[in-house]
Image (cartoon, rainbow, N blue to C red):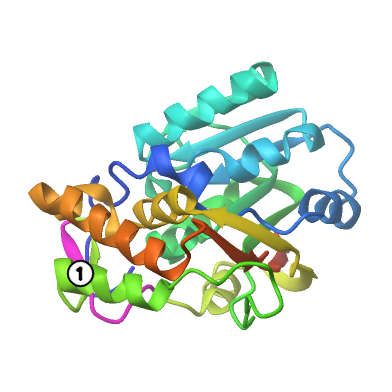
């Protein structure tokens, strides 16, 4: 992770209840892409590392015979377990509360390992090497994220875009100018350069795929507020006794920006890198 910052258990404390409503989904067609590229047939084992509330693990549940989601936050795993019940897939999924650095944790070997916008929170060299050892011969690691170079605009859509920059100004006003992360701060943000890390661990590739987004979405005030409280840098606990005041200020800002209480947004595209275990 970043020099001078250490992970702690409060990183996503209190965010789980907001995550599913607040975060934008991955682009439609992601599961179909993986099924085609990896020739998945409903068998095999998937480990989703840093699974959060099970977004990827449950979205891929029909592609594997067994799925293990690993996350250190018990609130996230509770949300994942509830969603698994609603989807009727509890018989094939298992949720393990652990940090990625604690793997392999006796979980066995896997056909596919996924990281969905989670790898940057980990001791990346250690975790990449460990996960490679957990993959079966011919296994793959799949790194999934929103397409970082994409510029999305609400122009031409029926409602205004949410005033995200103004909301970030509010966050800085309440929490200070440096990004908060658990009990610490990330002055330079989270690290990039994942390709170098995976290559050092012995992975081969990658194959790159993009699942196109751009579909128009409608978001409510409650959706945007939930999105803000799903973020590590504005997790509810960071505001302490000022949480209510912050939320009221955000809602006031949103209602001024769109009296209808609705906002337009475009679905992000999803970028997928497939890394082979190698020799």
Residue 89, compared with residue 177, is above or below; it is above
Name the one closer to the observer, 47 or 137.
47
Q: Main secondary structure of the magenta part?
A: loop
Q: In the shown orientation, is residue 225 left or right of residue 268?
A: left
Helix, strand, or loop for circle 1? strand
Q: Quadrant of the N terminus?
A: bottom left
Q: Can see residue 242?
A: yes
Relative image position of residue 209 (x, y in whole percent): 79, 70
Q: In the shown orientation, is residue 149 left or right of residue 14?
A: right
**Magenta stretch contains residue 184:** yes
Instruction: In the displayed orientation, state which residue is furthest to the front.
Output: 259
Residue 147, compared with residue 68, is above or below; it is below
Name the one closer to the observer, 194 or 31.
31
Specify few, some or many for label 1: CA neighbours under 10 Å numbering under 14, 14-19, or 20 or more: some
Name the one closer to the observer, 89 or 122.
89
Q: Residue at x 52, y 43 (%)?
A: 20
Magenta stretch bounds:
183-190
Q: Residue at x 71, y 66 (%)?
A: 272
Relative image position of residue 5 (x, y in whole percent): 21, 67
Label 1, on which residue? 185
Which quadrant of the figure has residue 109?
top right
Relative image position of residue 14 (x, y in whole percent): 29, 41
Relative image position of residue 6 (x, y in whole percent): 22, 61
Q: Residue at x 47, y 30 (%)?
A: 79
Q: Residue at x 45, y 53 (%)?
A: 221
Residue 93, compared with residue 242, is above or below; it is above
Q: Can see residue 106?
A: no
């Amino acid at each position: 992770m970043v020099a001078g910052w250490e992970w702690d258990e409060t990183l996503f404390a209190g965010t789980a209840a907001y995550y599913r409503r607040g975060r934008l989904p991955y682009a439609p067609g992601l599961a179909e892409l993986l099924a085609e590229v990896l020739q998945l047939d409903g068998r095999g084992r998937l480990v989703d590392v840093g699974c959060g509330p099970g977004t990827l693990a449950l979205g891929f549940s029909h592609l594997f015979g067994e799925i293990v989601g690993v996350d250190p936050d018990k609130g996230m795993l509770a949300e994942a377990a509830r969603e698994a019940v609603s989807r009727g897939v509890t018989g094939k999924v298992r949720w393990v509360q652990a940090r990625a650095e604690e793997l392999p944790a006796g979980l066995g070997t896997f056909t596919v390992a996924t990281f969905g916008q989670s790898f940057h929170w980990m001791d990346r060299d250690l975790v990449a090497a460990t996960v490679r050892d957990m993959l079966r011969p011919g296994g793959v690691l799949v790194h999934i994220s929103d397409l970082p170079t994409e510029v999305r605009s609400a122009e031409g859509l029926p409602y205004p875009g949410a005033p995200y920059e103004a909301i970030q100004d509010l966050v800085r006003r309440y929490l200070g100018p440096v990004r908060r992360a658990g009990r610490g701060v990330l002055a330079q943000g989270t690290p990039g350069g994942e390709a170098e890390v995976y290559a050092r661990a012995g992975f081969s590739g990658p194959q790159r795929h993009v699942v196109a987004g751009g579909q128009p979405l409608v978001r409510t005030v409650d959706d945007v507020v939930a999105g803000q409280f799903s973020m590590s840098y504005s997790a509810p606990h960071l505001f302490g006794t000022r949480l209510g005041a912050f939320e009221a200020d955000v809602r006031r800002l949103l209602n001024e920006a769109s009296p209808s209480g609705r906002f337009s947004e475009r679905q992000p595209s999803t970028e997928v890198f497939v890394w082979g275990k190698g020799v």
